[in-house]
Image (cartoon, grey):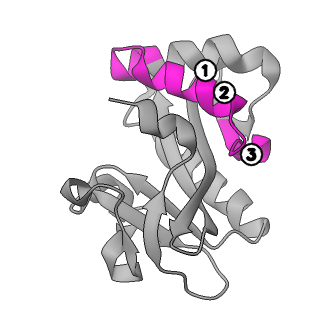
């Protein structure tokens, strides 16, 4: 398996990955919308390829911390085809994405996800880093990973396409 930057020709395969991973089209549509948003950062949209096929995808887009609008990253969606789950594909994608982000001097990545899984990848409850979830009901599952630079704090806001996700 290799992890590389997503290419335009990968978009159909990425859509299929998310539909298979989540069993619904929501995350696939969100990914398409994120690619069209001002918060899209092409270098932070990565695919995992095994046997010549795209088997996983992770994307981080520009988020911000309010009230000052401090630029940070929001990770998601992260999807892996069911046949490749629990084989390290998601872990490799998250580590690669964090490494690219850190090399680009990003300060923080936040996400909504399972604490047990993301805790192994260096994420902690966002509140421990002074970052408040956009929705207070998410607090238990809203996590962040500090990458470098000065500490940041505030209420997290995802890229605009996340606002329409139900």
The residue to which callout 3 is attached is 41
User: Considering depth in this image, is 114 or 84 the residue closer to the camera?
Assistant: 114
The residue to which callout 2 is attached is 49
Local crowd size for mark 3, using a 10 Å CA cut-off: few (<14), some (14–19), many (≥20): some
- Is residue 121 left or right of 106 when viewed as pictured? left
Q: Residue at x 52, y 19 (%)?
A: 29
- Is residue 48 left or right of 110 when viewed as pictured? right
Q: Residue at x 77, y 40 (%)?
A: 42
Residue 45 position (above or below residue 20): below
Q: Which residues are magenta?
A: 19-46
User: Considering depth in this image, is 95 or 41 the residue closer to the camera?
Assistant: 41
Report the number of numbered marks: 3
Cα separation, mark 2 vs mark 1, equals 11 Å
The residue to which callout 1 is attached is 14
Q: Is residue 1 visible?
A: no
Q: Residue at x 77, y 67 (%)?
A: 103
Q: Is residue 31 magenta?
A: yes
Callout 3: SS: loop
Instruction: Kindly indicate whether the residue at mark 1 contacts the one at mark 2 (C-beta within 8 angstroms).
Output: no
Report the predominant secondary structure element of the magenta stretch. Answer: helix
Residue 136, percent from left and from top: 23, 60
């Amino acid at each position: 398996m290799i992890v590389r930057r997503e290419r335009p020709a990968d978009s159909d395969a990425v859509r299929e990955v998310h539909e298979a991973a989540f069993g619904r089209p929501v995350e696939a549509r969100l990914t398409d919308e994120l690619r069209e948003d001002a918060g899209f950062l092409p270098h932070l949209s990565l695919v995992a390829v095994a046997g010549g096929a795209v088997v996983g995808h992770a994307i981080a887009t520009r988020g911000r911390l309010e009230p000052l609008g401090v630029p940070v990253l929001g990770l998601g969606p992260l999807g892996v085809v069911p046949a490749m789950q629990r084989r390290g594909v998601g872990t490799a994608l998250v580590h690669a994405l964090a490494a690219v982000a850190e090399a680009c001097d990003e300060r923080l990545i936040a996400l909504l996800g399972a604490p047990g899984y993301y805790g192994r990848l260096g994420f902690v409850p966002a509140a421990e880093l002074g970052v408040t979830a956009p929705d207070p009901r998410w607090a238990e599952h809203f996590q962040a990973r500090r990458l470098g630079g000065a500490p940041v704090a505030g209420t997290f806001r995802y890229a605009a396409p996340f606002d329409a996700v139900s």
